[in-house]
Image (cartoon, grey):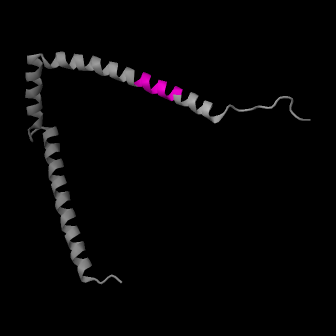
């Protein structure tokens, strides 16, 4: 027995247009909420940075943390030393590989 009604889908242009409209409206609402939140944070950050006592306190604390005698300062120094050692080792091994490649004939 054949079905009484036959389901006919909408033309592809209409479906595509409706999908795009939904996606664009979602994008616009998301961007609007992001920008409104960013404006609130910008205003609060601006008022915070105008407080001279707070800025001087943060500057002194950051300077103390940057000293190599503190844990974050020591970790930063270790990070810099390891990055420099890594760069030197990469250079050495690359030069060695290139020197070796010049002496070996690749057929």
Q: Is residue 89 left or right of residue 19?
A: left
Q: Residue at x 58, y 33 (%)?
A: 16
Q: Residue furthest right?
A: 1
Depth order, front residue of 25/74: 25
Where is residue 58, by image quadrant?
A: top left
4 is higher (above) or lower (below) than 53: below
Depth order, front residue of 63/36: 36
The segment highlighted magenta reads 21-30
Q: Is residue 42 left or right of residue 84?
A: right
Q: Is residue 28 left or right of residue 106?
A: right
Depth order, front residue of 51/12: 12
Classify the position of the N terminus by image quarter. top right
Where is residue 42, by image quadrant?
A: top left
Depth order, front residue of 52/3: 3
Q: Residue at x 24, y 82 (%)?
A: 103
Residue 67, percent from left and from top: 8, 38
Magenta span main SS: helix
Residue 80, percent from left and from top: 15, 49
Q: Is residue 101 left or right of residue 68?
A: right
Q: Residue at x 12, y 19 (%)?
A: 54
Where is residue 69, by image quadrant?
A: top left
Asked whether 1 falls inside the magenta stretch, the response is: no
Residue 28, percent from left and from top: 43, 24
């Amino acid at each position: 027995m054949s079905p009484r009604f036959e389901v006919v889908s909408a033309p592809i242009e209409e479906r595509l247009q409706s999908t795009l409209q939904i996606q664009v409206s979602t994008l616009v609402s998301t961007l609007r909420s992001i920008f409104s939140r960013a404006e609130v944070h910008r205003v609060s950050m601006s008022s915070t940075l105008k407080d001279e006592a707070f800025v001087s306190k943060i500057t002194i604390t950051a300077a103390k943390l940057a000293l190599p005698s503190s844990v974050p300062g020591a970790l930063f120094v270790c990070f810099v030393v390891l990055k420099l050692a890594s760069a030197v080792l990469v250079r050495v091994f690359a030069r060695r590989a290139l020197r070796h490649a010049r002496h070996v004939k690749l057929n």
